Amino acid sequence: MPVAPARNIFAFMNTALVPPLRLMQQRHFVLFWIARLASTVGYQMLALLIGWQVYALTGSAFDLGLVGLIQFVPAVVLTLVIGHAADRYNRLSIVRVAQCVHALAALTITTALVLHALSRDLLFVAVFMIGCARAFEMPTAHSLVPSLVAPKLLARAVAAWTSANQVAVICGPALGGVIYALNPIIVSALCAAFFVTSVTLLAFVRPRGQAERREPPTLRSALIGFEFIRHRRRLLGVITLDLFVVLLGGATALLPIYAKDILNSGPIGLGLLRSAPAVGALTITVIMSRYPIERHIGTKMFAAVAVYGLATIAFGLSTWFPMSLLALVVLGASDAVSVVIRFSLVQIETPEDKRGRVSAVNYLFVGSSNTLGDFESGTVAAWLGAVPSVLIGGLGSLVIAGLWMLFFPTLRRIDRFEPADESERV
């Protein structure tokens, strides 16, 4: 059954935007799901407000890039500490503390807006607080889901968890943009309310039992994951492809510039621009749940990366708001196809006894590429302008796709979701 792993992954997506009936009977999971939805909407709205305010205060593309860099640092520096904390301490408490830090950051911005004391440095402090909180929250929250439902419901729980994130990514920026046009203070205050709501709901969640005591993460255990990836050529190709494409192709950090200076769409337009990729991703995953990719996996992965690069170029050149939205929808859809294939291959290539460490390394690469990609886009935009920065990112994605097809021919020749044989090791 070579395509079974892929079918399992696509089955995660074959769910409604709310938990189905059997999951609705799992009280603690439902509370956790609603808390997740509330906190992600709050985070997306706060990200929109911060991006708009940073650019409004400084007019600097480089400062927009710094927002990504500031969030990148905690995710990398704290990696081993986060793993140790998640394995040794109460995971639910860690998530609640992280949500409290988010609420504190939102309240800080709200107070500064009320007192007319908002500054670039204060926004960067808030971004650092958010970066530290998310670095602890995200991996810990994911590890909590299995303890909230029966094992036979885990697939549906993961699907519902994913749908909550997609809905929040779509609705959060759009809602934030509309409210920002009325009054930015209301946006930050609502963000704080969303985070407080999440913390309150989490107080009523009771995971089943305590997490199993595992060997604490160490530098040596992390290096085992790197070593395993280095000796599996297909795995190395998949992970590095993700790293460099997102690093070069990210244009999210520059959306405030496009909304304000190029498309003249204001904060409402910014909200719609930030939501558009998630609309594309959600649409394509629904289609893929009914028509899963089963053959010519490698070719279709590289084709999706190429479409991602072309969509980035189209967005960079567009000065018409509907065309820009369409380009971002296509960008999100193509990225979703590529992500699903890459995620499937990573899981299939990795044996059970090494899956945790390899996944940790993969998570580190994915997280760092997103935030470093924002910094790269902002830095290049500061030197050359926003449009050249986006165009360079799109062209870079195409170049990376072409080079990786040459450097990793076994990756291009993958036909089905099945492990590589030993002859394909580096």
Image (cartoon, grey):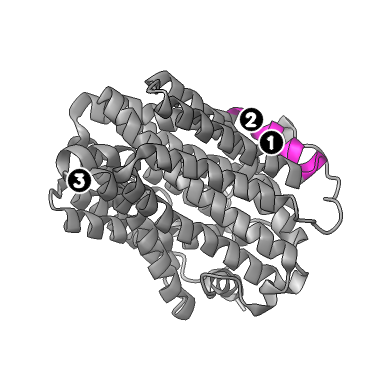
- What whole-number distance in Å separates the C-alpha atoms at marks 3 and 2? 34 Å
Magenta residues, as a range? 77-90
Quick one: label 3, few (<14), some, or many (20+) residues within 10 Å?
A: many
Spot the residue most to the left. Answer: 319
> How far across and down, in percent of the image, does residue 197 sit?
61, 49
**Residue found 24% across the figure and 60% down from its top:** 326
Q: Answer with mark 3 or mark 2, whichever residue precedes in sequence.
A: 2
Camera-side residue: 377 or 184?
Answer: 184
Q: Secondary structure at mark 1?
A: helix
Which residue position holds label 1? 82
State whether residue 230 is above or below residue 309: above
Q: Can see residue 17? A: yes
Q: Secondary structure at mark 3?
A: helix
Q: Can see residue 424? A: no
Left/right of residue 336 with respect to residue 58 in the rendered view: right
Q: Answer with mark 3 or mark 1, whichever residue precedes in sequence.
A: 1
Which mark, by number, is residue 78?
Answer: 2
State whether residue 110 is above or below residue 203: above
Quick one: label 2, few (<14), some, or many (20+) residues within 10 Å?
A: some
**Is 398 part of what is drawn in magenta?**
no
> How far across and down, in percent of the image, does residue 104 sit?
58, 32
Q: Inspect the image, locate mark 2, and give the three-letter code of the amino acid beneath it.
A: Leu
Do the residues under discs 2 and 1 have CB atoms within 8 angstroms? yes
Q: Quadrant of the N terminus?
A: bottom right
Q: Inspect the image, locate mark 1, and give the three-letter code of the amino acid beneath it.
A: Ile
> How far across and down, in percent of the image, does residue 10 sit?
53, 71
**Residue found 69% across the figure and 68% down from its top:** 154
| Picture quadrant of residue 18 | bottom right
Q: Inspect the image, locate mark 3, and give the three-letter code of the amino acid beneath it.
A: Gly
Camera-side residue: 313 or 225?
Answer: 313
Which mark, by number, is residue 316?
Answer: 3
